[in-house]
Amino acid sequence: MKDNSYLKWLSSRTASVYWHDSAIVAEQECAFSNGAVGMTTNPFLINATLRNDTATWKPMLAGLPAQPAGDEKALQLIRMVAGYFAKKAYPIFQKGEPGQGYVYAQVNPNHTGETGYMLQQAKLLAAWEPNIVVKLPATAAGLRVYEECVGLGINVASTLSFTVPQVLAAAEARMRGKAKALAKGIAPGLAIAVLMVGRLDDYLRDVARDSDSPVKESDIIQAGTACIKRAYCIFREKGYDAFLMPAGCRGAYHVRDLAGAGMIMSIAPKIAGQLADEAGPFRERIEEPVPRDVLDRLLTLREFRRAYEPEGMEPEEFITYGSTNRTTAQFIENGWNPIVNFSY
């Protein structure tokens, strides 16, 4: 296993919490040896590990009952994979450190606007293991379920989330749900608000090209960072206790520029590999602002303003934001639906 001095520094010497972003067993073991204390899964990653890490899953697949169909089949396979990793992370979870020892399981992305459907599935996923975190979309419907789940003591995270308005809405839903939980004598679980920094950059890159904008590539790759840094300041000002999570990173720069933040960072093996090449001494950069001239150019893009301004969108607009549509389609077409069609 390759030693990663940067990730060991990040996870042990700063306030940042490192989660691994892959469901391949060998990659998970390497990440945890370098300081990871939690794990991201989603339909795309579950499908990838079932098809590419066959040596691990073949014996477990043989022990499953006869293949069901539809959601039942997908959930059976997701439970097998997420449950496996949840059990591996459980000793860390037992230590009780904030944000440590948890594993994600995501609701069906085919139903991002259906409150009742998602709530029923969230309760099911949460019952699998005590350290499962249920991923819900940061749509108006998904955030209603998020609030309800917090009120029930369920660990939750908002996904399909790319903007400051979305993470602020998740943080507010957390506060309302927490008040409901405490009123009923229920201990609130972990709450995470994801901002998919790299996927926002990807979307804005296409927007800039389509509008023949003067925005530069060097500006684009700082857009997601600018948004999550702004959200981080607001979270601290308002005293929100949900963890922000940068995810969908596209380069080591996304992690470097946020180093030291009291966030949970979801880091994929590719990005971890880039960070392994970093030479010390390392430094925290969360307090270093995105340059004003970069922000000024980005703010010429309406879609960046919608993502960056705290009131840039209303909740009913979240489901139609460009990045939401693109990522939902990937989770469905390259994740959930292939899991349903997986033969074992």
Image (cartoon, grey):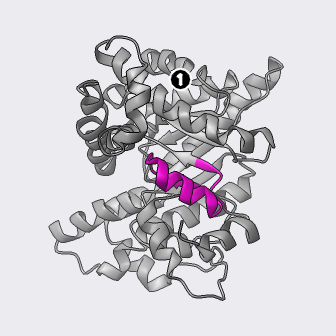
In this view, 62 is above or below 15: above
Q: Which part of the image, by quadrant, shows the N terminus?
A: bottom right
In this view, 240 is above or below 258: above
Q: Residue at x 51, y 34 (%)?
A: 82
Q: Residue at x 67, y 78 (%)?
A: 284
According to the picture, the residue beneath numbered tag 1 turns out to be 125
Q: Which part of the image, by quadrant, shows the C terminus?
A: top left
Q: In this view of the protein, which residue sits in the foreground, 191 or 229?
A: 191
Q: Residue at x 31, y 14 (%)?
A: 67
Magenta-span inclusion, residue 127: no
Q: Residue at x 57, y 88 (%)?
A: 279
Q: Quarter of the image holding residue 85?
A: top right
Q: Dot 1: within a 10 Å radius of its alpha carbon, few (fewer than 14), some, or many (20 or more) residues?
A: many
In this view, 17 is above or below 342: below
The residue segment tinted magenta is: 17-38
In this view, 69 is above or below 130: above
Residue 123 location, x and y as percent? 56, 18
Q: Determine the secondary structure under disc 1.
A: helix
Name which residue type carries label 1. Leu
Residue 21, visible in the rendered structure: no
